[in-house]
Image (cartoon, rainbow, N blue to C red):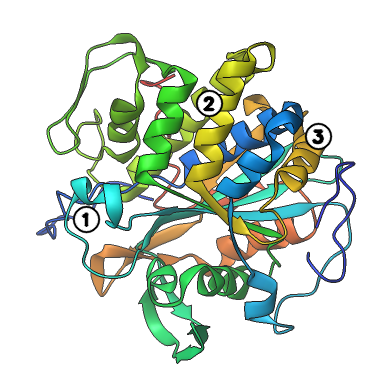
Amino acid sequence: MADSSGSAKTAETRGRAIRPKGRRRKGPTRRRRIATITVCGLVSVVLLGGAGLGYVYFKLNGNLKGVDINAALGHDRPKNVDDGSMDILVMGSDSRAGKNNEYGRDEGAARSDTAMIMHVYKGRKKASVVSVPRDTMIKRPDCSKDGKDVPGANRAMFNTAFEVGGPACAVKTVETISGIRMDHFVEVDFTGFKKLIDALGGVEITTSKAIDDNSSHLHLKPGTHTLDGEHALGLVRTRHGVPGGDGSDLGRIQLQQTFIKALLKQVKNVGVLTNPTKLYDIADTATKAITTDTDLNSVSELTGLAKSLGNIGAENIDMMTLPVTYDPQDPDRVLPLTKQSRQVWDALRQDKEIPKSAIKGSAGDKGGTDNYVK
């Protein structure tokens, strides 16, 4: 893993366009799914704030939870490329356990909403983030969980990997479809996301058009708003209230990408480093909310990573959705576009910028939401 100077990996670790006409399957209206893109913002708070927290090191260290991804996956993984870059899989958990049950009945094991592959380029001055829609149909590899084998599947939704096999299976699935070794894993849940936004004092966004969505209980008039945790969660999960949207998860991903940049700007401007009390509250909230791989689940490791990523701001992050098309067998599902997806993964594997041609013909990235949310 990377040290505080941003050194290279070691050998040990290292959407949617207009929907086709026809009947739309009714979605789970009571399931509030946290957008994984917001995890990046939460992680940024931990990383950017970590350097000033030595005086509460042991308290915060005790908050962190870790999963030993390396031990679970062994050596059957993509090659560890020692080029100074870093790849982090960030995910959101929709478990209804504990306080999360207010968002709906738990139907079993937790699922991931969407996953984000965050590629930090050599030099640690810029990053690319690729969203993988939860309904993407993929070939899920064989996994294991709690010592039990979990058979793979030729046609499975991407988010089932986390459900049936936990974090290790999610990482293995991403590595299988991308051919890129993940250096780190980070997960956050509903309650942690809301508390983090509240601890930050809210996140400011500006809407040029009204957003009305009864399902997410979000009603915003045109203008500038400071969203608390509850309303921020409503914004990143809204599908039906977006002007001109098609009610799909692909459109929601683009809205989430807009929100995360606003969140990152808020983190930069919140002034926590000059306010020890606020800094502690934010760090305490964030470290309780996340689960990481065991190479990252200590304040010292987060602090080291923070120092190496300190030059990356919202303006230095390119965001996109994995190139996909609607599944002919089920219009409520999507399939990766083989050629374009290969362009994405090849670029990241070679530590290069993703070419614009990669989104050609994709059902995602159809103009984004910057025209009505800033």
Give the distance between the C-alpha atoms of the residues marked 1 and 3, in whole angstroms.
47 Å
- Name the residue tied to disc 2: 281
State which quarter of the image contains the N terminus: bottom right
Label at residue 292: none
Three-letter code for the amino acid on which mark 3 is drawn: Lys
Q: Residue 136: horizontal and vertical position, in percent?
A: 39, 65
- Name the residue tied to disc 3: 307
Q: Residue 279: horizontal and vertical position, in percent?
A: 61, 22
| Residue occupying the point 25% across, 31% down | 242
Relative side of 90 to 315, left or right: left
Relative side of 190 to 340, left or right: left
Give the distance between the C-alpha atoms of the residues marked 2 and 1, in whole angstroms.
47 Å
Asked if 304 appears above or below 339 in the picture, the reply is: above
SS class, disc 3: helix
Classify 10 Å Cα crowding around label 1: few (below 14), some (14-19), many (20 and above). few
- Name the residue tied to disc 1: 20
Nearer the N terminus, badge 3 or badge 2? 2
Classify 10 Å Cα crowding around label 3: few (below 14), some (14-19), many (20 and above). some
Relative side of 173 to 272, left or right: left
